[in-house]
Image (cartoon, coloured by chain):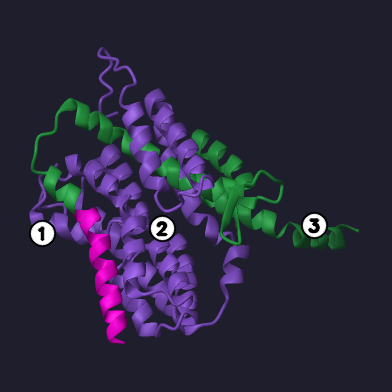
Chain colours: A green, B purple
Amino acid sequence: MREYALLIAGMAAVTYMPRMAPLMLLASRDLNAHVLRWLEMIPPAVLAALLAPELLLSSTNGEKTLFFSQDNVFLLAALPTFIAGWISRSFFGTVVIGMGTVALLRNWHTIKNSLAAVLF
Amino acid sequence: MSTEKDFTLKNFLRGARLSLPILLGYLPVGFAFGVLAVQAGMEPLTAGLMCYFVYAGSAQLIAAGLLANGASVATVVITTFIVNLRHLLMSAALAPYLKHWSKTRQAWFCFEMTDETFAANLSRFSSCGVNAGEAFGLNFFSHGAWTAGGILGAFSDSAIGYMTYAGLDFALPGMFIALLLPHFRLPRRLFAAGLGAALSLLFITMGIDQWNILAATVCSATLAAFWPVNKRRNDVRA
């Protein structure tokens, strides 16, 4: 139990420092245009760097490889999500289309079979 | 940009509404962490405390995996440090918006900064201005969902399967898409995003998979900052 207290305290400290230090150090300063320009590029770069592996990689036994396949549900769902978001500009709409597409693709066989049972 | 008057219950609850996609993502992922934490030998209370005080999704999932394999406290803490260093950049990117906040407020806000709350707050700050009530509401409910998910997962054995059938595991990728899209309308930001995605994939497939986000973001933001500035158009903070 004491080991867990140490573990949580250690993990919390090393997580908090990088979250806190830059903001608190930079917020009190006037930043020059070049720094602001660099900071402006961080959100699109970091969001894309986080998203791309979710959509394009598969992990088998810890080995991560590119996953271009019709079995890649996230990649398939990303397409209508991007299109819906680009057209609608709606935040919630975009997320709902994405989750809905994933649910649809995962349950495709069940849906197809029940539709077939109803129609024929 | 009011400073004190925006911290109202109404704004706090609006923050709750803004946190909805994060909530939908954090509950099942937190749940998955809870299940794995117990399998790795943690008590439900310990898992809950870790969710509250560490509050870092990927680092906690990696920690559970390491602990299950008998890793030492030092190994887990060092790995957590490396995995979470990417927040340096997010913290820096938020700094220009929060100048007028008190140090206490900044310090508390940073405690609840994750990939998702960073992205959702920043998009709100740049489109509607800074509103402390909204920001802390968004953070509070996201933090609560993560902790609640972790504790629920620690007390139950599985049920993750049902959530994947409902597409809940796409809530966070879906949110990243929604937050990324507005940046696509400015060529230099589209360039930064394309580069970030490509380098992140490249670094992971090269085997640098704990540094990939940090390295890809630094390289892409630096290169994209050289994109020519159009002085006539006032698009500095578009």
In the rendered structure, which amino acid carries the disc numbered 1? Thr
Is B75 placed left or right of A93 in the picture?
left
Residue A7 included in the magenta stretch of the image: yes
Label 2 marks a residue whose chain is B
- Residue B57: image quadrant is bottom left
Against A35, is B53 above or below? below
Q: How far apart are marks 1 and 3 (CA)?
A: 56 Å
> Do marks 1 and 3 share a chain?
no
| Contact between labelled residues 1 and 2, with CB atoms less than 8 Å apart | no
How would you rate the neighbour count of disc 1 (Cα within 10 Å): few for under 14, some for 14-19, many for 20 or more? few
Label 2 – label 3 distance at C-alpha: 31 Å
Q: At which x and y percent is residue A65?
A: 60, 48
State the residue lying farthest toward the right. A120
Circle 3 is placed at which residue position?
A112
Q: Where is residue A43 in the image (x, y as percent from the top left)?
A: 34, 40
Mark 2 or mark 1, whichever is nearer to me:
1
Q: Give the range drawn in magenta.
A: A1-20
**Front residue of this view, candidates B10 and A72:** A72
Q: The C terminus of chain A appears in which quarter of the rendering?
A: bottom right
- Identify which amino acid the numbered label 3 is placed on: Lys
Q: Which residue is drawn at 46% across and 84% down?
A: B155
Closest to the observer, A43 or B120: A43
Q: Are marks 2 and 1 on the same chain?
A: yes
Find disc 1 in the rendering and name its residue. B104
Q: Is the magenta stretch mostly helix, strand or loop?
A: helix
Whether residue A93 is visible, yes or no, is: no
Residue position for label 2: B22
